[in-house]
Image (spheres, helix red, strand yellow):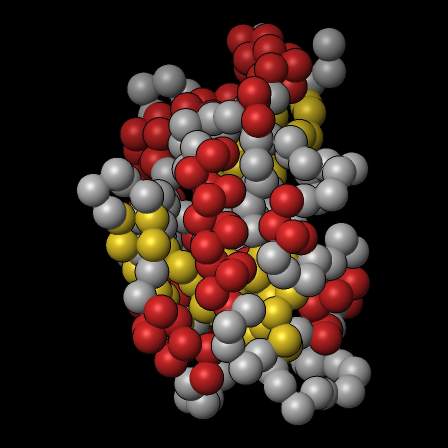
């Protein structure tokens, strides 16, 4: 058994079992945040029990993230179990290799990409999002509405999950792009997300393009991050009907798509990429 391991998450059973045994023997474990989510989305139980409880050291992208007040509070929460620390790395420099500025020819109409979350199927986890049937209904209604606007809409499905390797049903109502997000993002003028626990939204927020976040009310941001999100992107809250189906205000969404306010990604770049 090694005295030190590095891992991408303490939530994987094999890595977790090994980490606990190494810690029991007086060794060290170092786990790393995945996708930027743990740096921005406030999920105290998930982070504390899933990561910090099995980590000697937990690494986030930058010092700015590591110094967030809630991060320090979580270390105190886990203190009865073990002593752990959160440190900031030198930033996710891979983001610099992405098309952070718009590339390619612009059309007469804005190209708007609706980037969806994963449909989990039988492996669904209650904390990950809406039930698949409700989410698919929401995707259909959103894609149909976007197709009525004077824009070029493209649906970007999550590459894994239940529909992996299959034709996604939303292709029946919207043009669908099955390329990797990083391959198509340079062609997009406006990104629309309805889920924030994904690498793609943090990459998009570092670009010079407009980002719209349809808030389904499923996640909360850290206190320092919430105002950054409000400054960087348009947040359109979901509206739930008497059957608990999410919807949106079409006028508010249309206004967000065509709004011309300046875009400044520097705060998000500092959080994810560093200086």
Q: In this view, does 70 lie to the left or right of 153?
A: left
Q: In which quarter of the image is residue 186?
A: bottom right
Quadrant placement of the C terminus: bottom right
Front-most of residues 168 and 100: 168
Q: Is residue 49 left or right of residue 58?
A: left
- Give the residue at x 51% y 72%: 148
| Location of residue 176 in the rendering, given as x and y in whole percent from the top left corner | 70, 58
- Give the residue at x 42% y 85%: 259
Q: In which quarter of the image is residue 121?
A: top right
- Give the residue at x 46% y 78%: 257
Above or below for 82 versus 232: above
Q: In this view, does 171 lie to the left or right of 258?
A: right
Front-most of residues 81 and 157: 157
Above or below for 108 versus 51: below
| Location of residue 18 in the rendering, given as x and y in whole percent from the top left corner | 64, 13
Front-most of residues 229 and 2: 229
Above or below for 69 versus 12: below
Furthest toward the left, the residue is 242
Tell me how many marks there are: 0
Quadrant placement of the N terminus: top right
Front-most of residues 138 and 28: 138
| Location of residue 2 in the rendering, given as x and y in whole percent from the top left corner | 73, 15
Whether residue 172 is visible to the viewer of this picture, yes or no, is yes
Q: In this view, does 49 lie to the left or right of 217?
A: right
Whether residue 90 is visible to the viewer of this picture, yes or no, is no
- Give the residue at x 41% y 28%: 126
| Location of residue 22 in the rendering, given as x and y in whole percent from the top left corner | 61, 13
């Amino acid at each position: 058994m090694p005295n030190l391991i590095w891992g991408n998450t303490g939530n994987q059973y094999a890595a977790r079992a090994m980490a606990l045994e190494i810690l029991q023997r007086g060794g060290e474990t170092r786990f790393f945040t995945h996708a930027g989510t743990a740096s921005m989305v406030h999920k105290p139980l998930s982070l504390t029990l899933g990561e910090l409880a099995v980590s000697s050291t937990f690494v986030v992208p930058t010092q700015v993230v590591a110094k967030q007040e809630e991060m320090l509070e979580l270390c105190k929460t886990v203190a009865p179990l073990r002593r752990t620390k959160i440190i900031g790395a030198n930033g996710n420099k891979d983001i610099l290799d992405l098309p952070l500025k718009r590339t390619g020819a612009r059309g007469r109409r804005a190209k708007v990409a609706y980037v969806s979350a994963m449909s989990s199927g039988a492996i669904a986890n209650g904390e990950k999002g809406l039930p698949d049937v409700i989410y698919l209904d929401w995707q259909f209604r959103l894609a149909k509405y976007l197709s009525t606007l004077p824009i070029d809409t493209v649906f970007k499905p999550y590459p894994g999950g239940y529909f992996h390797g299959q034709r996604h049903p939303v292709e029946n109502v919207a043009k669908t792009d099955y390329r990797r997000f990083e391959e198509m993002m340079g062609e997009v003028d406006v990104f629309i997300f309805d889920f924030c626990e994904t690498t793609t939204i943090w990459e998009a927020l570092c670009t010079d393009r407009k980002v719209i976040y349809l808030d389904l009310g499923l996640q909360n941001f850290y206190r320092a991050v919430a105002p950054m999100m409000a400054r960087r992107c348009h947040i359109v809250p979901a509206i739930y009907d008497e059957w608990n189906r999410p919807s949106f205000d079409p006028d508010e969404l249309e206004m967000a798509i065509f709004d011309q306010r300046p875009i400044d990604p520097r705060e998000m770049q500092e959080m994810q990429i560093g200086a």
